[in-house]
């Protein structure tokens, strides 16, 4: 039975790795793990995608560089053994630097993130989390034109001690677009030191506990950023969407129960920089090649 489930898990991972990555993916990571002992959680991450070239005709010789950094503080307020609230605030900054960009000259974009949510363990073997978040542009706090809104409903079901099932929805609204993604998949532990996470599009990875404090992993990373440029650009209030994905190796260090450090390096697949007008029409797709990337992340609970 376990080996049948292993086959079912690895097959969708293979499909994701072979995907052309021209679709939409959630803008930011989401969590469904309310801290059971520490009310506060502080996290940060940095991703540096090396300079790459374009594949689209007429763009030969032009380069594209992308970096992303984010930080967040979350507070969990348990109201009972089975229910509580989650409050969060954070920042996401990105650099999207395209040589001789015909649409806009801005290269740095920043969001402030505020969220509120709740979790419930009222149903046997289930953990449900509902989170509502707003991502506000640092330079223009227009709630209609420049703000992204996101809602996440995520349920985890503990089928048995070695299998967890995940279901949910991610809704994104704003910048003249509405989009819904399903959350589906499972976490599977076929052996004591091996974990397989196949939860699309949140966590696709194979992990091996090398020692008590060290874990090595191979995973799929989705990189996506959606933003509106300023009104004084060549394409006034135009909207861009950077989208790519990659495969990476991870080294995870857990020196304490309340701290997790991770370093990672990998290569992206071919990607797409989609730019539209202010109404999300007349799209231009600037296809680019894959490139190497690396980064690090940390989480501390207290």
Image (tube, rainbow, N blue to C red):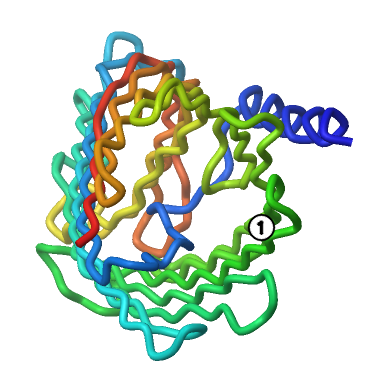
User: Which of the 4 image quarters holds residue 223?
Assistant: top left
> Could you say which is closer to the camera, residue 243 or residue 155?
155
Residue 233 lies, in percent from the top left, at 16, 50
User: Which of the 4 image quarters holds residue 206?
Assistant: top right
Please give the name of the residue rendered at 48% of the width and 85% of the height, measured from the top-left corner.
Answer: 83
Q: Is residue 177 above or below residue 290?
A: below
- Position of 227 with respect to 27 (left or right) is left
Quadrant for the N terminus in the image: top right
Q: Is residue 301 above or below residue 250?
A: below
Q: Is residue 162 visible?
A: yes
Please give the name of the residue rendered at 55% of the width and 32% of the height, measured from the top-left corner.
Answer: 205
Q: Is residue 211 above or below residue 32?
A: above
Dot 1 falls on a residue whose secondary structure is strand
- Position of 135 with respect to 149 (left or right) is left
Q: Is residue 136 visible?
A: no
* Crowd around label 1: few <14 · some 14–19 · many ≥20 (10 Å): many
- Position of 196 with respect to 106 (left or right) is right
The residue most toward the bottom is: 79
Residue 178 lies, in percent from the top left, at 52, 68
Please give the name of the residue rendered at 65% of the width and 71% of the height, measured from the top-left corner.
Answer: 126
Q: Is residue 54 above or below residue 36?
A: above
> Could you say which is closer to the camera, residue 260 or residue 72?
260
Q: Which residue is mark 1?
A: 166
> Could you say which is closer to the camera, residue 184 or residue 244?
184
Please give the name of the residue rendered at 43% of the width and 69% of the height, measured from the top-left corner.
Answer: 150
């Amino acid at each position: 039975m376990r080996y049948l489930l292993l086959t079912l898990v690895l097959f969708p991972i293979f499909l994701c790795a072979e995907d052309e990555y021209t679709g939409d993916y959630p803008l930011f990571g989401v969590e469904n793990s309310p801290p059971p002992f520490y009310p506060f959680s502080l996290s940060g991450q940095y991703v540096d995608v090396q300079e790459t070239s374009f594949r689209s005709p007429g763009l030969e010789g032009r380069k594209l560089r992308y970096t992303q950094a984010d930080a967040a503080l979350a507070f969990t307020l348990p109201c009972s053994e089975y229910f509580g609230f989650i409050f969060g605030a954070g920042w996401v900054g990105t650099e999207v630097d395209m040589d001789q960009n015909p649409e806009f000259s801005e290269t740095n974009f920043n969001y402030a993130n505020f969220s509120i949510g709740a979790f419930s363990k009222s149903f046997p073997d289930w953990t449900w989390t509902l989170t509502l978040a707003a991502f506000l542009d640092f330079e223009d706090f227009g709630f209609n034109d420049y703000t992204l809104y996101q809602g996440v409903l995520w349920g985890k079901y503990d089928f048995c001690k070695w299998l967890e099932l995940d279901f949910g929805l991610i809704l994104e609204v704003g910048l003249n677009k509405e989009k819904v993604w399903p959350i589906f998949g499972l976490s599977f532990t076929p052996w004591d030191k091996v974990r397989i996470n196949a939860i699309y599009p949140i966590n696709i990875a194979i992990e091996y506990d090398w020692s008590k404090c060290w874990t090595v992993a191979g995973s799929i990373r989705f990189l996506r950023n959606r933003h509106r440029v300023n009104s004084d650009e060549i394409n006034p209030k135009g909207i861009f969407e950077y989208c790519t994905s990659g495969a990476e190796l991870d080294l995870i260090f857990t020196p304490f129960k309340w701290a997790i450090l991770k370093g990672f390096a990998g290569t992206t697949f071919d990607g797409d920089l989609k730019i539209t007008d202010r109404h999300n029409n007349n799209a231009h797709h600037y296809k680019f090649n894959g490139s190497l990337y690396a980064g690090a992340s940390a989480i501390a609970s207290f």
